[in-house]
Amino acid sequence: MSEPSKPQGRKFQLPEHLKVYKNVWVIVEQERGIVHSVSLELLGEARKLADKLGVEVGAVVLGAEGPDLNRICGDAISYGADIVYKVTDPVLADYRTDPYCRVMTDVVNAYKPEIVLLGATTLGRDLAGAIATTLATGLTADCTELDIYADNRSLAATRPTFGGTLLCTIQTLAYRPQMATVRPRVMAMPERDDSRTGRVEEVFPNLQEESVVTKVLNFIADREQNEAQLAFADVIVSAGKGLGKAENMKLVFDLAKVLGAEVGVTRPLVQAGWAGSDRQVGQTGKTVRPKLYIAAGISGAIQHRVGMEKSDLILAINTDPNATIFDFAHLGLVGDALTILPALTDAFGRRLSVNRLAG
Amino acid sequence: MHIVVCIKQVPDSAQIRIHPVTNTIMRQGVPAIINPFDLFSLEEALRLKDKVGARVTVLTMGPPMAEASLRKALSLGADDAVLLTDRKFAGSDTLATSYALTSAILKLSEEDPVDIVFCGKQTVDGDTAQVGPGIATRLGFEQLTYITRIEELNESAKEIVVQRRSEGGVQVLKTRLPCMITMLEGTNTMRFGKMDDMFRAARYELKTWSRDFTGAEEAKVGLKGSPTVVSKVFVPKPRAEKAKMITADGSSPDALAAAALDAIFAAQPKLADDLLARAAAGL
């Protein structure tokens, strides 16, 4: 990437005292011993950025001391970290903004990373917004692409803007660290490599529980997942406005059932009340990367595209041969989803049941 | 009890234009609405007003035309409205915006201490979810984001119990006021305005505050106070190759579907095995 054009009237040079900031960090998100997959995806991305810069990948793991935390530190190394900052204190057992923000601010100020990445989750967004404020630095939300500008070694964080109509590249030129959040499933999961080695640096912040105002009275884990599990589905059948009316969603569910697939929808369908927001794919919904994505009656607005374009194989069905979705789908079918969907349900049903009998 | 609800007027459309020199978004000429996520927070504030008799002030930073959103909020039941507007604020990123809004909240607190600040979960135009946490951090308020329910508000003890959505479950949190809350969408339904509130909203004399008035430092607002630089705005590139179009003799749905299956399995032979294995497993 070449350096972009610069608007007038602002400082763009990195001050001398900030040039000591080095290394690419990921704040590893764990909740009750469970690491969020986005943190591992980010370690893979941090590895690429660090290799371009010729620096190390640091993983920050916060929590209460225990076997879970030690396991997570090992995982961070296997997924790409060179050094793990293991920050332990009983006060950090559950996520709360204030102690996490205080500790992260101190750790960043002490070790001076040039880039800090977090998942764009409820925890990551909550924490990132707070520490970018205490550190008075730039934070770019929901990035879909991260790169390094060769000329000035700065982070180029690209994200959809205005509901995804356009993409913009954002940089933090004169401040450190450069911070960004990335949504789950936007970046590929790196291969785990247990032969990797790394160092663990222990940090003891010595917090006082009395100094924390907010108390966790209870944590109700989601036991039964009633919500659609789109993010990790292998096959997704999605519907857009081309379906015409809510009753036609049945055709989508029928095909999904035959394929053992999840059902996704575009934002307008959620707004129209045809489906819950847990099924929304796109910039304000979920990002997915299934092996097969069938898009029925979806025009291909960027808002939707950014949530599904990393699918292995996209089949688009649309009556309009000029629909935008055909610009980025792998397979296109010009036709009415209302007749094609039942035909696909039959065809898949036949092919798969033939095998079941044979098997 | 004094509650401030921060709202943002956003374009109600995908039509946007980008300033060719500054690469910032030009909002002129696009129909405007209150950011939909803000309405869940406004409604929650109005419910607290109904329950404990709080005073609700709506605050927005934006161009003079943002007045329309404030009047809308007044017509829904807010008591007071402040428009923070100054050309010096133009081009503020989230760090500068949270600084400017904080200066106005501090100004409001001088006259009537603020107990709760509500913000929207995020905006539909910026989608950052950063301004709420920025305000909470600057004010030193307890930060409660993605709240699904306010279980309890004890006014005399200044305590609040809320349910907060996390990735793997729900946290039940108890904290002390003052705090900053962002409500998760779908947690309540915005009321209809009452007739007398609508009349009051139309007559209400807005407080219009400038940077000078709130005492915000010039170097910390606008482009100058914004660490992030929009270096490039662009239309996403189409994939190098367009979709391979599926055709079939006669173009009957059945023929097209059969051709589609062949194309899918030709492109992803492993997928065929996966699907067959699932079918065999009875899925």
Image: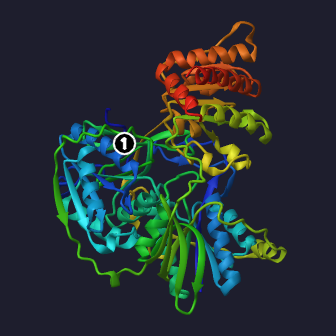
A283 horizontally vs A157: left or right: right
In the rendered image, which quarter contains the N terminus of chain A?
A: top left
Q: Is residue B31 left or right of residue A282?
A: right
Front position in the image: B194 or A181 = A181
Q: Is residue B212 visible?
A: no
The residue positioned 66% from the left and 74% from the top of the image is B206
Tell me the amino acid under the disc marked 1.
Answer: Lys
Task: Classify the position of the C terminus of chain A by image quarter.
Answer: top right
* Image height of A52 relative to B74, above or below: above
Quarter of the view holding residue B217: bottom left
* Residue under label 1: A6
Q: Nearer the viewer, residue A148 or B208?
A: A148
A58 in relation to B239, above or below:
below
Q: Is residue B21 above or below residue A316?
A: below
Residue drawn at the location 37% of the way across and 80% of the way down: A212
- Residue B245 is situated, as x and y percent measured from the top left of the image, at 61, 15
Tell me which residue sits at (64%, 41%) in the image.
A266
Mark 1 falls within which chain? Answer: A
Residue in the foreground of this view, choosing between A22 and A68: A68
Which percent across, then down, holds residue A121?
A: 45, 55
Viewer-side residue, A140 vs A288: A288
* Residue lying furthest bottom: B156
Determine the secondary structure under disc 1.
loop
Residue A28 placement (x, y as % from top left) = 33, 55
Q: Position of residue B255 (x, y in %)?
A: 71, 13
Quarter assignment of residue A152: top left
**Residue at (27%, 40%) from the top-left corner?**
A49
Dot 1: within a 10 Å radius of its alpha carbon, few (fewer than 14), some, or many (20 or more) residues? some
Residue A56 in view in this figure = yes
